[in-house]
Image (spheres, rainbow, N blue to C red):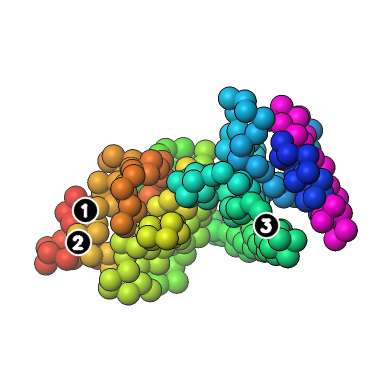
Amino acid sequence: MKKEILIIDDNPDIRSLICNILTEKNFLVRSAANYDQALFEINKKLPDLAIVDIKLDKGDRDGIDLLKHIIRIDKNIPVIMISGHATVKIAVESIRLGAYEFIEKPFSTDKILNYVNRAIETFNLKAEKEFIENKLFHSFDLIGKSPSVIKIKKTIEKLSNSESRVLITGPTGSGKELVARKIHKNSIRNKEPFVILNAALLKENSYEKELFGEEFSEGNISFGALERANKGTLLIDEVSEIPMETQANILRVLIDQKFKRLNGKKYINVNIRLISSTSKNLKDLVEIGKFRERGL
């Protein structure tokens, strides 16, 4: 099936140029010249990809507002932001808000096609991954009618209706991730991300980066698990492996609902539900000083 792309730019020459480039490559193309036209096209039918100019018709609303609108409807729709006047700050902000990529004008035909093809490929891979994960998830269930299984099911139902933090314990292979997924799937956050961080697989000096993300001098950003799980659920598997100092930092995020990326200056606001799992006895670890008594 042909992919449909929406081009939003108030410059008729740029708009026409991109439309012609993509039409020649057998894409279906729609276009809009200003915010109101774009909003009409987006609400009429979501495209498979949007190319959005940041500055639009000198109005109060701009491409960033359209990016937010698209992401609110479907966060998986790739959005490529373009501009000839944007600052590095605006470019970084657009990526942080969920844009797939930022391209500075003027750009070559090869460059725009490269980003479009990559964005669509990424979208297809995400859709395929989500389909497989959902299929796998629904192919497994808690079976049995023993008192223990019935008790677990009732506990999952109860926890799904709350926003409390959860700790799941049990030996390796006992289904801790399955329980966590079911709690998320049955909760009000079920349309939002479910992110897994396996603490046992991380190197000693990488916990903070994997959790909080990192900002680099050239403006690039590495998003951490906390940010990727925003509005959804974060499962920290084998939470006993998290260093004491990092445990304290995570707890501060849960209390304040904000944090800074490594090398970052700006606070990132998040709203996550934390589920932790472990195959170890945390009480024993608390007694020997390897886990915080005020746990996660």
Residue at x 19%, y 50% (from the top left corner): 294
Q: Position of residue 33 (x, y in %)?
A: 75, 34
Q: Could you give the CA–CA distance between mark 3 and mark 2, rounded to whole angstroms?
A: 48 Å
On screen, residue 93 above or below 147: above
In this view, the residue in front, 128 or 209, is 209
Q: Is residue 31 magenta?
A: yes
Range of residues picked out in magenta? 20-41
Q: What element does badge 1 sit on?
A: helix
- Residues at circles 1 and 3 in contact by the CB criterion of under 8 Å: no
In this view, the residue in front, 3 or 282, is 3
Residue at x 73%, y 65% (from the top left corner): 110
On screen, residue 209 above or below 186: below
Q: Farthest residue in the top direction?
A: 60
Q: From where the camera sits, is residue 250 visible?
A: yes
| Residue 194 located left or right of residue 128 | left
Residue at x 72%, y 50% (from the top left corner): 49
User: What amino acid is labelled 3 in the image?
Assistant: Phe
Task: Determine which residue is flagged by label 2.
Answer: 244
Q: Is residue 29 magenta?
A: yes
Mark identifier at residue 248: 1
Q: Could you give the CA–CA distance between mark 1 and mark 2, rounded to whole angstroms?
A: 6 Å
- Residues at circles 1 and 2 in contact by the CB criterion of under 8 Å: yes
Task: Determine which residue is flagged by label 3.
Answer: 107
Q: Residues within 10 Å of mark 3 (few under 14, many from 20)?
A: few
